[in-house]
Image (cartoon, rainbow, N blue to C red):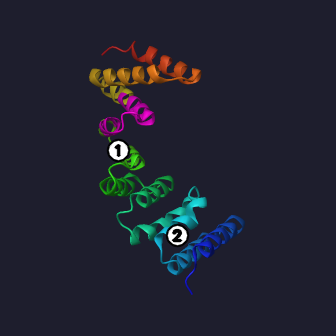
Amino acid sequence: MVRSVPDARAAVAAAVKEYRSEADIPRLLARLDAICAETPDAADLVAAVEPFREIHEVAGPVYERVVEREPDNAAALVALANAYWLTGRGPDVVGALASRAVAADPGNRAAWHLWALTESSPRGRMNRWHQVTQRFPDDKLAHAALADNATSVASAENDSVALKLAIGTYEMLLATATAAEERSALSAALGTLRKWTF
């Protein structure tokens, strides 16, 4: 018998409840596998697992099945990549999923963030964040990541170009910051960076 959406939701909720009580990973995985097998519509699986996306040992296995069924579903690829990242699967696996998500939906900002985050080289990561800020100019989180990574490259490599990029990006963030704590932190960072000489 095929489960309906409410049944899939109830089944996932019951599996999670049991897992929280028993902490039996093999049992959890077996139950999730059965639920996925009995739920033919990937959208129903997404709806069933949505309340538990932050429990990565639940989200990961379900989104694996969703991605198997819909290999170009950018949102599912991002959810799976995030679950993998937070359970330590490593930048190569996560980066490949993020790249697939970017290719499937170039407007998916979360995919771009994961793509930038998974670059292992500090300079490469800085360059990726720079690409993200060019694609999403209003993305303050990406600008902050760019500034932080540029600061790291400047410090590690005595790179005056990276330092200039970090300062310029922090200045832009300061110009648009409204919260007092944020302005104070940005001002302190700028004060430090402006004293650096190479």
- Where is residue 40? Give x, y as percent: 48, 78
- Where is residue 120? Give x, y as percent: 35, 44
Amino acid, disc 2: Leu
Residue found 69% across the figure and 67% down from its top: 17
Label 1 to label 2, Cα distance in Å?
33 Å
- Where is residue 130? Give x, y as percent: 32, 35
Q: Is residue 22 above or below residue 106?
A: below
Q: Nearer the viewer, mark 1 or mark 2?
A: 2
Res 76 quadrant in image = bottom left
Can you see residue 91?
Answer: yes
| The N terminus sits in image quarter | bottom right
Q: Is residue 176 above or below residue 46?
A: above
Q: Secondary structure at mark 1?
A: loop
Q: Is residue 132 magenta?
A: yes
Q: Is residue 180 magenta?
A: no
Residue found 38% across the figure and 25% down from its top: 169
Residue 13 as seen in the image, left or right of residue 98: right
Res 21 quadrant in image = bottom right
Residue 68 as seen in the image, left or right of residue 180: left
Q: Which residue is mark 2?
A: 45
Q: Are marks 1 and 2 in contact (CB under 8 Å)?
A: no
| The C terminus sits in image quarter | top left
Residue found 38% across the figure and 51% down from its top: 91
- Relative to the observer, which residue lies in front, 45 or 115? 45
- Using the image, tell me which numbered label, if any, was put on residue 85: none
Q: Which residue is mark 1?
A: 120
Start-end of magenta stretch: 126-150
Q: Is residue 155 above or below residue 65?
A: above
